[in-house]
Amino acid sequence: MTAEVTHQLRSDARDNRVRILAVARAAFAADGLDVPIREIARRAQVGVATVYRHFPTKEALFAAAFAEAMATCSTIVEEGLAAADPWRGFCLVIEKLMAVHALDRGFSRAFTSRLPQAVDFFTQDRDRSLRLILELVRRAKETGELRSDLVLEDLVMALMANEGIRAESSELRAAASRRFAALMIQSFRANPVAEPLPPAVRLPLSAH
């Protein structure tokens, strides 16, 4: 086998892996973790064996599909917790988490869903991030800036609503998410201040 052929095979394998991961993210977002590997292979236009060659189990595929987004979220929460001003740290976490979730609906749905024990790797990282957010919430409440009756479920509900944003492009979805995050931050504040919001985004209306 020539070096050129070997290089082409490696390139094809990389392309297959990228395509499988992209399809898996979309499939998990639409159908949950129950979507069959065979269906993911069909949508990715590869054989089932090709999927298993890259990802021996469905859980391994799930882990790879959302590993980067989960790591990004963990970093965001740690950055917010390290902020000198807990309220500003809280705002940073809301803004950045919503941005990540708006651009990856599959990850957002996974983050806010009850998942099987088989995906411990994901739930452990997520639960650690949620515990850190709770600590940040506690600190922000102590400053008097964050309303005292806010609970974790309020933040999860905001993330779920943010995931539902529909727009014609990722840029518009991100812009709409920025405005929604600003609205949420104002509602979370103990004494809301009417600050200017980011520009509004025209979103498509659906009858469904």
Image (spheres, grey):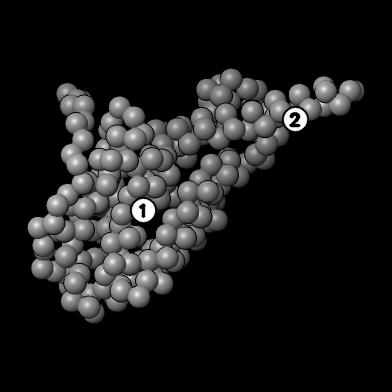
Residue picked out by circle 2: 10
**Up-down: is 134 above or below 27?**
below
Residue 48 vs residue 129, the one in the foreground? 129
Residue located farthest toward the bottom when viewing the structure as drawn: 142
Q: How many numbered badges does the structure rendering display?
A: 2
Estimate the x, y position of residue 60 in percent, counting from the top left: 60, 45
Residue located farthest toward the right when viewing the structure as drawn: 1
* Left-right relation of 89 to 186: right
Q: Quadrant of the C terminus?
A: top left
Q: Amino acid at mark 1?
A: Leu
Estimate the x, y position of residue 148 in percent, counting from the top left: 17, 72
The span from disc 1 to disc 2 (Cα, nearest Å) is 35 Å
Among the two numbered marks 1 and 2 on one chain, the one whose residue lies closer to the N terminus: 2
Please tell me which residue is depicted at 63% across the width and 33% down the height of the picture.
17
Query: How packed is label 2: few (under 14 Cα within 10 Å), some, or many (20 or more)?
Result: few
Q: Amino acid at mark 2?
A: Arg
Say which element carries label 2: helix
Residue picked out by circle 1: 97
